Amino acid sequence: MPLQVVFSVLMVCVLLLALCGNAVVCVMVYRRSAMRSAINFLLANLAFADMMMAVTTVPFDLVTVVTAQHLFSAALCRASAMFLWLCMSVGVAMLLVISMDRFLIIVRRQDRLTPHRAKILIAASWILAFFLSFPLLLEYPQLQVPSSVPQCVLSSSSDSSYHGYMLILTLVTFFMPFAVMACAFAAILNCIRHNALQIRCDTALSLSKPRPLHLSVDVGFKTRAFFTILLLFLLAFASLAPLVVFSLCVAFSNAVTSGAEFSQVSVWLLIFSFLRPAFNPIIYYCRIRKFRHACARWVPTLCRLRPPLPRHAQRRIQPSAVYACSEHHSSI
């Protein structure tokens, strides 16, 4: 009973954070034309996938955790597992596209991602993720519906086709994208370190011998968003890697499912996988200045993370305010 209460409270908090935070991200990008850039489209699609995962999987898992038994049909269990892997795959694909865009900008000095190309990549990621996760909804490969485990995918099977499908699913949706992202981030960090050393050497030479200093201002501007993407990458890897590895172990070994702690471990891993949709909006708010300004404008006053400014202070910081002055008085 204490574990059930802890699991239930965690799932409710994760559900509320994922729904509210990611909904705000989607609304900000939709309502503000200034935020409709290519990378913001990708972040909005990532937020939409996280919100879909929270809606389609967390409530069913919460009911299973509270009641300590699976009350839904096998078809609904399969649908919940399919949506879990579908939204996970789309989220990883968006992180991969954003990472490769930062790699091309910082390392290769090529800015090729446009809003039109971003929309094409978003559509392609949803189509590919749907074809990869749709077999979970069908009768083949065979899946077992567990009695107390929230997800159908966390079940063992002796079918070789199920083993092959799980290998392909985990390789395409997790291991290969994260390996590519890790190589891209390593190249970006190496490039940033090289640029920092070059700037330091140029500064030392300019002090010893006066000469014009040629610094690349664009490098600092373009790398500003890289560390935000790196945080998203680390959070996604830390939250999804245990669930993916555990799913492979369960698929290939019956000894894992027969353990006494199988149900508790599976619930913990599912909660860890749900931390990414819950904490991504917090990272956006802390790291992206445009998102903070958009929240301060569109989110109601009671939902703001800081108290509202007084009216005279708002007039002072708003550049759109037009003042008409005369000899005797001034007015807006």
Image: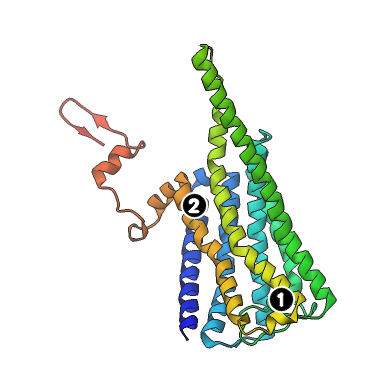
Residue 323: mark in rendering: none
Q: Position of residue 101 (x, y in %)?
A: 65, 43
Q: Position of residue 331 (x, y in %)?
A: 23, 35
Which residue shows up at 53% across the image and 14% down it?
Answer: 212
Judging depth in this view, the residue of 197 and 79 nearest the camera is: 197
Camera-near label (1 vs 2) is: 1
> Sequence order check: which comes first, mark 1 or mark 2?
1
Q: Label 1 to label 2, Cα distance in Å?
A: 35 Å
Residue lying farthest to the right in this orientation:
160
Residue lying farthest to the top in this orientation:
210
Dot 1 amino acid type:
Val
Label 2 Cα neighbours within 10 Å, binned few <14 / some 14-19 / many ≥20: many
Mark 2 and mark 1 in contact (Cβ < 8 Å)?
no
One can see residue 52 in this view: yes
Q: Position of residue 200 (x, y in %)?
A: 54, 26
Which residue shows up at 69% across the image and 79% down it?
Answer: 256
Q: Position of residue 17 (x, y in %)?
A: 47, 65
For mark 2, give the secondary structure.
helix
Which residue shows up at 29% across the image and 43% down it?
Answer: 314
Q: Which residue is mark 1?
A: 250
Residue 284: mark in rendering: 2
Q: Is residue 70 left or right of residue 156?
A: left
Label 1 Cα neighbours within 10 Å, binned few <14 / some 14-19 / many ≥20: many
Dot 2 amino acid type:
Tyr
Quadrant placement of the C terminus: top left
